[in-house]
Amino acid sequence: MAKVVVGGTFECLHDGHRKLLKKAFELANGDIIDIGLTSNEMANQRERHIPDYSAREEKLRIYLNTISSKKQPFSIIQLDDPYGKTLDEDYDTIVVSPETYPVALEINKIRKDNGKSEISIVEVDFLLADDEKPISSTRIAGGEIDIHGHLKD
């Protein structure tokens, strides 16, 4: 049984997020996926306003139901810190972006220090916008690009 974990703020659920989530579902191959969703407290430590947890969770759940089969269970877990359940729970794989790769390394260091086995890390490259720069929520919130990476005028 392959237990996979992935996490994020999923502020506007752009195509880069979708790529990351699809990879998690692919790796789980019908087994459980835990999706960590940052809490309001964590999300709003940023310089811009992030939509409320419940709104982000609803959009995330709607999307996940479109890529999940009934055989592919998933759960959304509130993240109150960068690690969620990864320090204690036994996962086979953690799916990360280049931005969150250092957190996965930190998770494995803490796990190793605590006598737990490391989690296999799968890094999914950024999806690039039309201008060959990564699609990001920051760029979308700033009005530079849309959720698909198309430049706005």
Image (tube, rainbow, N blue to C red):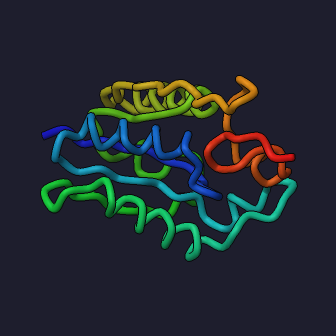
In the depicted view, which residue is nearer to us: 125 or 78?
125
Residue 142: x %, y % from top left: 85, 51
Q: How many marks?
A: 0
**Snapshot quadrant of residue 38:** bottom right
Residue at (41, 32) in percent of width and height: 111
In the displayed structure, does residue 55 sit left or right of residue 72?
A: right
Residue 94: x %, y % from top left: 39, 35
**Snapshot quadrant of residue 144:** top right
Residue 124: x %, y % from top left: 48, 27
Residue at (52, 58) in percent of width and height: 37
54 over 114 or under it: above or below? below
Residue at (42, 35) in percent of width and height: 95
Residue at (29, 58) in percent of width and height: 74
Name the quadrant of the N terminus: top left
149 over 112 or under it: above or below? below
Q: Residue furthest front?
A: 153
In the depicted view, which residue is nearer to us: 57 or 92?
57
In the displayed structure, does residue 136 sit left or right of residue 34?
A: right
